[in-house]
Image (cartoon, rainbow, N blue to C red):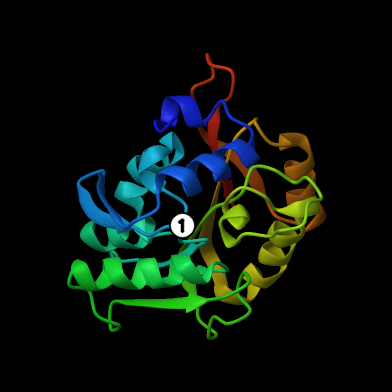
Amino acid sequence: MNTSVEYYKLAADEICDDVNETNQAVIKSQVEGVNLVIFPHVYPSHKFRTTGFVLRNLKDLIKGKAVCDMGCGPGIVGLYALHNGAKRVVQADINPNAIENAKENNTLQGFGEDQIKTYQSNCFDNVPKDTFDVIVFNMPYHCDKIEIDDPLKYAFYDPAFVSIKKFLKQAREYSHKKTQIFIAFSNKGETALLENVFEQNQYDWKLWKITNTDQEYDNRIYLLT
């Protein structure tokens, strides 16, 4: 039950239970050529096909850019961005375990705070005012109205889509006219509802990239401007 092929078929609670059961210690991994460690109770980026899909599609867009990785987990998007020429990166996550994990990976990769800064934050609440060229949010797929009793669940649940609504409202204050916002999602979640949220917040959006359409659940990236 530990590969991305199996994980994408599981219910969110089953994924959380399995991650907590199997990831009891720091583990070493690699995603798209970037070495990293994964702490317990942190989204295991290396086990999900979404991660590589997002990174491969952003690779040629981030050189020289200021990048924000929202919901950073162990920090792979930010690390990958710097390895591929990003000017600087800001990481944010609501899960305190993820923040410590991201900081550890930044140190292991030799990146200092002049290149990458990390904040525990509910969306942009604790992120100092800034302007980004690229903002990436690999958001939770499930909007069930549950009680979050484990920080890991923030990686899989956004009850009633409260966080994405908050993110979209705040993102305008961190954007300029040419900022690109990339939202990773799947039809495992409520795509029509999410697209309606984009429109309610008056974003121009398109389904920018999609893969795995021949399988039970796809992987997709929305581009908002």
Q: Please name the residue shown 52% across and 61% down the image.
A: 71
- The residue to which callout 1 is attached is 42
Horizontally, is 121 left or right of 25 in the view?
right
Residue 105, x across and y down, in percent: 28, 66
Q: Please name the residue shown 82% across and 54% down the image.
A: 200
> Measured along the vertical axis of the image, is residue 58 above or below residue 6?
below
Residue 36, x across and y down, in percent: 26, 56
- Asked whether 68 or 9 is in front, the reply is 9
Mark 1, other Cα within 10 Å: few <14 / some 14–19 / many ≥20: many
Which quarter of the figure is the N terminus placed in? top left
Q: Please name the residue shown 47% across and 45% down the image.
A: 21
Dot 1: element: loop
| Figure quadrant of residue 47 | top left
**Tag count in the figure?**
1
Residue 225 at least partly seen: no
| Figure quadrant of residue 201 | bottom right
> Measured along the vertical axis of the image, is residue 92 above or below residue 13?
below
Horizontally, is 153 left or right of 208 in the view?
right
Horizontally, is 168 left or right of 82 in the view?
right
| Figure quadrant of residue 116 | bottom left
Residue 165 at least partly seen: yes
Residue type pointed to by label 1:
Val
Residue 225, x across and y down, in percent: 60, 56
Q: Please name the residue shown 34% across and 73% down the image.
A: 103
Residue 141, x across and y down, in percent: 64, 42
- Asked whether 188 or 63 is in front, the reply is 188
